[in-house]
Image (spheres, rainbow, N blue to C red):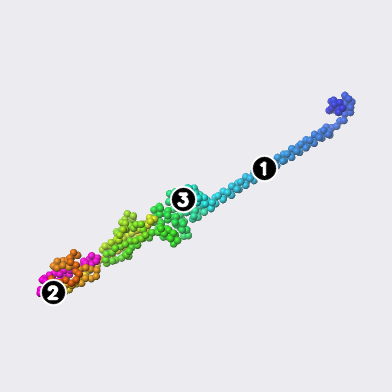
Amino acid sequence: MKCPSCHKEVEKGSLYCPHCLSEIPWVREFDSVETQLRKKEQQDSGEESDREGLSAGKFIYNRKRTIVVCLAAAVLLGAFCYRQLHTFSALYSHASQQFEQEHYGAAARSIEAALEKKPNNESANILLAKCLEKQGKLKEGILILKPLVKNADAGVGVYEELVSLLAKNGQSAEVRDILQNSSKKAQEACGEYMCSPPAFSIAPGTYTSLQKLELSGDYQRIYYTLDGTDPTLESSVYTEPVELNEGTTCIKAIGVNAKNIISEVASGKYIIVLKTPAAPVVYPKSGDFSKETTIKVSVPDGCKAYYAFDREPDVNSTEYEQPISMPVGYHIFNVILVAANGKTSKLTSREYYLQY
């Protein structure tokens, strides 16, 4: 310690300075003002450091909490937006836009995602089938729609798209089957695909005269056979009435409409039995005659008579049209009847001897 008067070093514990003999006011270090001030400064400095530390920690804490809140909000907002963009309505709308822009692959992907949410939605299934059709995948489109028509309440739109795909894929028999079992509304909506069997102008049955059969219907072409076999697109094409000759004819026909739908087979059995006219009645009977006489032949309706003297007549002989003058001398008069069906009667002969 130093002397407060001469400022020279004094041995610790001395009551007087050995240099200037001044009294040394000995005070313990911890009780000195200097010590107390230093302690106070140290205490204040420590408290300030503590306050600064607490303030910095609080700032860091608040900052972290803000970041966490912002991240949580961003996650919730992202989840909300994702859900909104992946609802059925949003996916269907996006698919429709892609389809209109002819982006059929993208449209198909979007509508498939929509169908995961509503698998039985008819509009979505129809749109998917149309996307597949545009990509040349007709069979896949058919497989999408076929299960829907098993529902009795299936909408008209499902039938329209399905029969269109079936027709383009050459499955006309299935078009017929589906429409036959559909509602009246569906049949009306798909009327251009309906194809009824051809109509016959005369009913099947037995006839006693030759007939001409006409086939009709709203078709591009009609194909038919006459031997009882089912017609195909390689069979005879109907262009004019079919002549039904004597005997039995089994005709079958199909029609093909503008959509290339083939009708079911129409069939008919026709039996033509041609009646042979009875031998003609001739007056007078055979005999001798001494005066001018006429020969008369009874000709039934629908028949013609052909005659000749002294030989057998045929269709090339003289046709009987009015009474004939009997020739002088001995002659044999021969006559036949020929019906409209071509059948010829038996010969009627009369012997006449005319002498004046």
Residue 213 falls inside the magenta stretch: no
Residue extent of the magenta highlight: 328-356
Nearest to the eye among marks 3 and 2: give it. Answer: 2
Alpha carbon distance from label 3 to label 1: 52 Å
Disc sitting over residue 292 in the figure: 2
Q: Earlier in the sequence, mark 2 or mark 1?
A: 1
Between disc 2 and disc 1, the foreground one is: 2
Residue 325: % across, % down = 15, 72
Residue type, mark 1 in image: Arg
Q: Quadrant of the N terminus?
A: top right
Q: Secondary structure at mark 1?
A: helix
Q: Residue at label 3? A: 131
Q: Is residue 179 visible?
A: no
- Horizontal side of residue 196 vs 305, given as left or right: right
The picture places residue 327, in percent across and down from the top left corner, at: 13, 71
Per the image, the residue denoted by label 1 is 63
Residue 190 image-quadrant placement: bottom left
Q: Is residue 143 left or right of residue 79?
A: left
Q: Earlier in the sequence, mark 3 or mark 1?
A: 1
Q: What residue sits 86% from the left and 28% below the top?
A: 4
